[in-house]
Image (cartoon, helix red, strand yellow):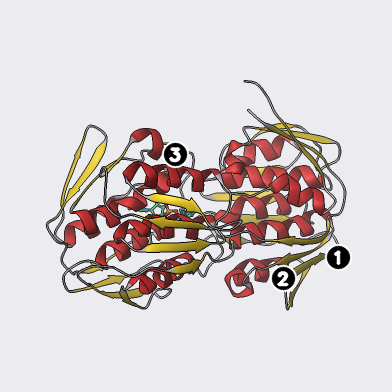
Amino acid sequence: MDKILIKGGKPLKGDVAVSGAKNAALPVLAATLLGPGEHRISNIPKLMDVATIKRLLNHLGAVISDHGPDGWTVRVPDLSRCEAPYELVKTMRASVLVLGPLAARFGEARVSLPGGCAIGARPINLHLMGLEKMGAEIKIEHGYVSVKAKRLKGARIYLDMPSVTGTENLMMAATLAEGVTVIENAAREPEVADLAQFLIQCGAKITGAGTDAITIDGVESLNGSAAHRIMPDRIEAGTYLAAAAITGGDILVRGCNPRHLDAVALKLREIGVEIREEPEGLRATARDRVRAVDIKTLPYPGFPTDMQAQIMALMTLSNGLSVITETVFENRFSHVAELRRMGADIQIESRNAIIKGVRRLSGAPVMASDLRASASLVLAGLAAEGETEISRVYHLDRGYEGIERKFSNLGGEITRIGQTS
Ligand code: UD1
């Protein structure tokens, strides 16, 4: 397994281009299962999770070829199997996104249950409740969920949590249902709107994606071929803004959509980081030691849970007491123990992390435990005195394209070392 070595303490300066969003690429690729069209999808990030969904689509019968440096041509003429096996689903929970498209187009799907994961129980009850409302028959046996439906029927579906992949799964399924579906309390994440744009090009009739009420007027089939560019990754962008702040640097994040980063920019400004909108993207300039602040993670447009670990790394060096409250996932503080090993002063009380700012962090061997936790350790390592060695970096490779290259270009001393075991 690879490790990442960081010699911290240097202010990062320069500009960095943001990649396509993992969380937009995964649902768009799953959506290609809905019809026989030939789609050209570009700005696909080179990530482990994207490689996993490619394997899954190939397994199901998709024909995929490269198109340009970051694009694929994808076609699903027919289905070879309707099953997403455990080996693929266990490494990536988002594999569940094939459930809705398979059930809608082929009338059946069998997907391994994702089970628990490092950041909480993460059930899929809302995905299943919605499909059931559309008339699907659902069975759970032998660790798999099976969905059968002759043709799904439009329904009014209220989500008691605005689940992101839940909204996406149901929106995809509803495109081929008979009649109108309304998803209420839908997730408003920009990735949902990005998926809707793709689906509309394929022939779907969708309004309201990006708001909390999405209306889908089902069609008989989706025969269109789409040319779609995946939206920029707002979490990757936010991570680089935080990197400028934590190292006392100055970074222009090129190609991000500033509107998607409003909640993150607001907090960074509140703690004294200068955030400027420039024609090419967002620039973060750190002036002094950051001020303490309280943050609560919320569904979009609130502060993203996927930025919680990174902002916590930053707050460990603030000038006072900060409270970070995680309201989206019940168990997403695995980075805390590792940050403490680097000298951070953090106490956990239920869903709150109470962070007393310290003057400096010191490099240490630490272990990555999930994707965003790993990013927070990289940020802490870049700011810390001395050397930090991060193991289990495969978590990072799930969601950050070329992270050590991008940080090296900004002046960070960061290298990857390969390991045999
Ligand atoms: C997506 C993102 C992930 C992000 C998360 C929250 C993708 C591929 N992943 O994950 O990066 O951290 O949104 O912004 O887009 N819940 C239920 N029942 C369900 C589904 C969810 O109770 O059927 C709960 C979850 O346990 C969690 C909350 O809803 O507490 C939000 O989860 P959800 O929005 O579904 O997260 P994902 O879509 O898995």
Within 10 Å of disc 2 (Cα), the crowding (few <14, some 14-19, many 20+) is many
**Image point 57% across, 37% down: which residue?**
369
Identify which amino acid the numbered label 2 is placed on.
Leu
Task: Measuring from the top left, give residue 259's x and y in whole percent.
Answer: 60, 75
In the visual, does 146 lie left or right of 395?
A: left
Does the CB distance between marks 2 and 1 fall below 8 Å? no
Q: Secondary structure at mark 2?
A: strand
Toward the viewer: 281 or 301?
Answer: 281
Q: Which residue is disc 3 drawn over?
A: 117
Identify the image quadrant of the C terminus: top right
Toward the viewer: 300 or 203?
Answer: 203
In the visual, does 410 lie left or right of 145?
A: right
Toward the viewer: 220 or 313?
Answer: 220
Instruction: Compare marks 1 and 3 and give the one earlier in the sequence.
Output: 3
Give the number of the disc on residue 282.
2
Give the number of the disc on residue 287.
1
In the visual, does 181 lie left or right of 165?
A: left
Identify which amino acid the numbered label 1 is placed on.
Arg
Task: Measuring from the top left, give residue 264's x and y in whole percent.
Answer: 63, 66
Q: Which mark lies nearer to you, 2 or 1?
A: 2
Identify the image quadrant of the N terminus: top right
Identify which amino acid the numbered label 3 is placed on.
Cys
Q: Quadrant of residue 345?
A: top right
Residue situated furthest left in the rendering: 150
Q: Which mark lies nearer to you, 2 or 3?
A: 2
Instruction: Compare marks 2 and 3 and give the one earlier in the sequence.
Output: 3
Within 10 Å of disc 1 (Cα), the crowding (few <14, some 14-19, many 20+) is few
The quarter of the image that holds ligand 1 is bottom left
Task: Measuring from the top left, give residue 358's x and y in whole percent.
Answer: 79, 47
In the visual, does 39 lie left or right of 160?
A: right
